[in-house]
């Protein structure tokens, strides 16, 4: 059964800085609690990450994943290529300019290979949304202030 999570939030940093944080996928373990490792395996011709291997730990599950990324000037989208625990994953950040910085729309859809109790699935969704909102916001604002 696929589950999804969505959130929208504002960041006091320019779109370019938010996108810089997203493009810097190898820094994920620094600002995203569930990410233990992130390694770029291949790059697009423009140098942006194309295929990324990650180790993600949420609740009782630690998973090694490979995801394929696509990028625009204001968006980041990824799809699962391989995983130990997931059948499907699709995520997206869309970043738009606001008078005070950026507005971010985040979506994540996953489908687990194994059945877990609803409470654990909901906890994982909450962690994903909190990380997207709090972690990305804090990192983008930190970089904007530097």
Image (cartoon, rainbow, N blue to C red):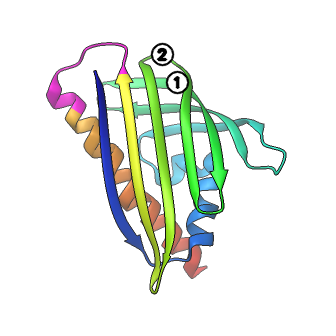
Is 136 in front, or is 112?
Answer: 112
C-alpha span from label 2 to label 1: 6 Å
Is there CB contact under 8 Å for labels 2 and 1? yes
> In the image, which disc is placed on residue 38?
none
Q: Residue at x 55, y 66 (%)?
A: 18
9 up-or-down from 3: above or below: below
On the picture, is 38 further left or further right than 138?
right
Q: Is residue 129 magenta?
A: no
Q: Quadrant of the C terminus?
A: bottom right
Q: Which corner quadrant of the image does residue 135 belong to?
A: bottom left
Q: Residue furthest top?
A: 114
Q: Residue at x 39, y 47 (%)?
A: 107
Which residue lies under the disc numbered 1? 64
Q: Position of residue 1 (x, y in %)?
A: 28, 20
Q: Position of residue 86 (x, y in %)?
A: 42, 21
Q: Is residue 113 magenta?
A: yes
Query: The magenta stretch spans which residues?
Result: 112-121
Q: Residue furthest right?
A: 45
Is 132 in front, or is 38?
Answer: 132
Which residue lies under the disc numbered 2? 84
Instruction: Specify few, some or many for label 2: CA neighbours under 10 Å numbering under 14, 14-19, or 20 or more.
Output: some
Could you say whether the residue bearing mark 1 is in a helix, strand or loop? strand
């Amino acid at each position: 059964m696929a589950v999804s999570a969505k959130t929208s939030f504002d960041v006091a940093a320019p779109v370019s800085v938010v996108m810089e944080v997203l493009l810097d996928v190898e820094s994920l373990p620094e600002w995203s609690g569930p990410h233990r490792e992130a390694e770029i395996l291949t790059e697009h011709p423009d140098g942006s990450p194309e295929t990324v291997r990650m180790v993600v730990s949420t609740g009782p599950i630690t998973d090694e994943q490979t995801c394929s990324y696509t990028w625009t000037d204001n968006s980041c989208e990824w799809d699962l290529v391989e995983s130990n625990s997931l059948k499907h994953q699709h995520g997206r950040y869309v970043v738009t300019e606001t008078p005070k910085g950026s507005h971010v729309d985040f979506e994540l859809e996953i489908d687990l290979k194994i059945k877990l109790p609803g409470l654990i699935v909901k906890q994982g969704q909450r962690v994903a949304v909190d990380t997207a909102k709090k972690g990305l916001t804090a990192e983008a604002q930190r970089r904007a202030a530097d």
